[in-house]
Amino acid sequence: MKKTTVINSDLSRVISQMGHFDTLAIGDAGMPVPATTEKIDLAVTKNLPSFIDVVMNIISELEVQEIILANEIRTNNPSQLTAIQKLFPDTKISFIAHEDMKKDLKDAKAFVRTGEMSPFSNIILVSGVTF
């Protein structure tokens, strides 16, 4: 049995296949996902698992060099933005329009759906390298 923190088999597979500059998206239960993007659905019920718990789990194994957030999180979910900033104190943060984020999901290796029910709880992680 796997000893590290990510034990979901699909999520573990995607993380292990990530290369430099590849992207992995994580989002709330309502984010629309393009049919061509693999969706790893972890949602069990409202707010389970939470967005921030899933992000914390993933970054325990994925090297992240940049994160991308929707501009709208600043005004529509500032507490979630603060939580994200605490997880990534030294990581570059880029902000784009939510509509552009939805379009960019087509290029992500996968989208991880959480049970999160707060608005604009979506992030795109840009993979870094460990050397």
Image (cartoon, helix red, strand yellow):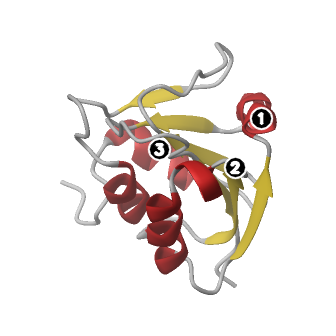
**Label annotation for residue 23:** 2
Q: For the residue carrying disc 1, how many other residues have a C-alpha within 10 Å: few (<14), some (14-19), or many (20+)?
A: some
Q: Which is more toward the observer, 70 or 102?
A: 70
> Real-space Cα distance between discs 1 and 3?
17 Å
| Mark 2 / mark 1, whichever is N-terminal | 2
| Residue receiving disc 1 | 107
Q: From the viewer's perspective, is residue 105 above or below residue 126?
A: above
Look at the numbered discs 1 and 3 and tell me whether their residues touch, using CB distance below 8 Å. Answer: no
SS class of the residue under badge 3? helix
**Label annotation for residue 38:** none
Look at the numbered discs 2 and 1 and tell me whether their residues touch, using CB distance below 8 Å. Answer: yes
Q: From the viewer's perspective, is residue 109 above or below residue 102?
A: below
For marks 1 and 3, give the one nearer the viewer.
1
Residue 126 at x, y = what percent? Answer: 70, 59
Query: In the shown orientation, is residue 16 left or right of residue 58?
Result: right
Q: Which is more toward the observer, 7 or 106?
A: 106
Q: For the residue carrying disc 2, how many other residues have a C-alpha within 10 Å: few (<14), some (14-19), or many (20+)?
A: many
